Amino acid sequence: MGLNSSTMTIQLQVDKMKEIAESRDESKSSSSSRTSGRRAIVPSMRPSTSRKTEGVSRPCTVCGSNSWDTDEVRGETSCSECGYVAEENMMDLGAEWTNHSGGDDRSRVGAPSTLTLSDKGLSTEIRRSDLTSGAAKRHGMSGKALRDWRRRQRVDQRSKTRDSRSRNLAKAMQFIRDRGDLPPQIEQEAAGLYRHSVDRGLVTGRSIRGVSAACVYVAAREARIPRRIEDVAESFDMTKDVDLKELKRTIRLVSRFLGAHHITGPEENFEKFHSDLGMRPEVLGRVRKMWDSVKDDLSWQGKKPSGIAGVIIYRASQESDSPRTQSEVCKVSGISEVTLRGLLKILNQKLIEKSFE
């Protein structure tokens, strides 16, 4: 009896173990069937190499081709087979490139190069304006730090101009920037003229100050900016008669060798003299009308353009309700009162002749 009961117990345990094993097999098979029923994860394919833009990923609706051409200038994407335009007015989502030098490199790094610096702005500069007492106070610099930075600035300046050519070029560019009083674009032209003068050997034997002043005057004249030689000479501290004669010779030399042959006319001084004298706008219209009536006469040949402009403005001001004196006009135009009265006689005679025609 005891043996039979133990045998039954063992049989029950074996059956139970079989049931557990079968249940495990069923669970595995069901899980595998569920897994096989799912859609397999397929990695995304690389875009076709024939695609030229991210905006068009479908085949052409006309010919079915998948080859696209992109016109970056017009912002269009067209089919390379049939020419169908799939997209237009596309936006460029890349970096905003700015090319200041006109070369192939469009990297946007640093300031544009400039001719007004001896190294064309390709190096770092410690400005003197940042090392003044007021600037040091604003930046919170102590006296010792200010002295150290001034010493560094001197060392930096000397390291950039070790040879005489670099030192002279830096000095000339400093003259043009500080004393030229020109718009930025015309300042670049004056610096370019000086560099061409150095290449042609025009600076040898002449003062850097004089050649710089001549380049400033020639650049202003070519840009139709009214500038008297006397004004340029005063800006460059060349007011002595010897310096003024040397400046005039240098101007003729630079103009001849560099091909700057523009001749200044009286009409280029009208607006400047009118503004300097503080006259009303209607006077300027009367001045232009008067000059148009007498400008073709040969009597003005050999006369100073600023003097002709001065006498016409003086004559027009006498016909207005706010006349100007001869001394005021002579001070602006740079001529003497005797010269003004002589030109006034010629002008009055020509106006009388025109009235009888």
Image (cartoon, rainbow, N blue to C red):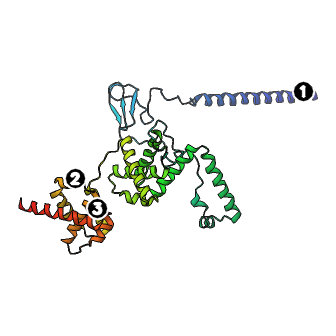
Q: Earlier in the sequence, mark 2 or mark 3?
A: 3
- In the picture, measured across the screen, residue 19 lies left or right of residue 107, that is right
Nearer to us of marks 2 and 3 is: 2
- Mark 1 lies on a secondary structure that is helix
Q: Is residue 108 above or below residue 18?
A: below
- In the picture, measured across the screen, residue 79 lies left or right of residue 287, that is right
- Gap in Å between the C-alphas at discs 1 and 2? 149 Å
Q: Residue at x 18, y 61 (%)?
A: 346
The three-letter amino acid code for the residue at tag 3 is Glu
| Quadrant of image for the C terminus | bottom left
- Marking on residue 271: 3
Q: Is residue 216 visible?
A: no
For the view shown, which residue lies furthest in the left direction?
Answer: 356
- Marking on residue 301: 2
Q: Is residue 102 above or below residue 268?
A: above
Question: Which x, y percent locates residue 312?
Answer: 22, 63
- Mark 3 lies on a secondary structure that is helix
Q: Residues within 10 Å of mark 2 (few under 14, many from 20)?
A: few
- Gap in Å between the C-alphas at discs 2 and 3? 22 Å
- Marking on residue 4: 1
Question: Which x, y percent locates residue 179?
Answer: 46, 57
Residue contact between numbered discs 1 and 2, judged by CB atoms under 8 Å? no
Q: Residues within 10 Å of mark 1 (few under 14, many from 20)?
A: few
Q: Nearer the viewer, residue 274 or 261?
A: 261
Question: Which x, y percent locates residue 109?
Answer: 53, 45
The three-letter amino acid code for the residue at tag 1 is Asn
Q: Earlier in the sequence, mark 1 or mark 3?
A: 1
Q: Is residue 105 visible?
A: yes
The three-letter amino acid code for the residue at tag 2 is Gln
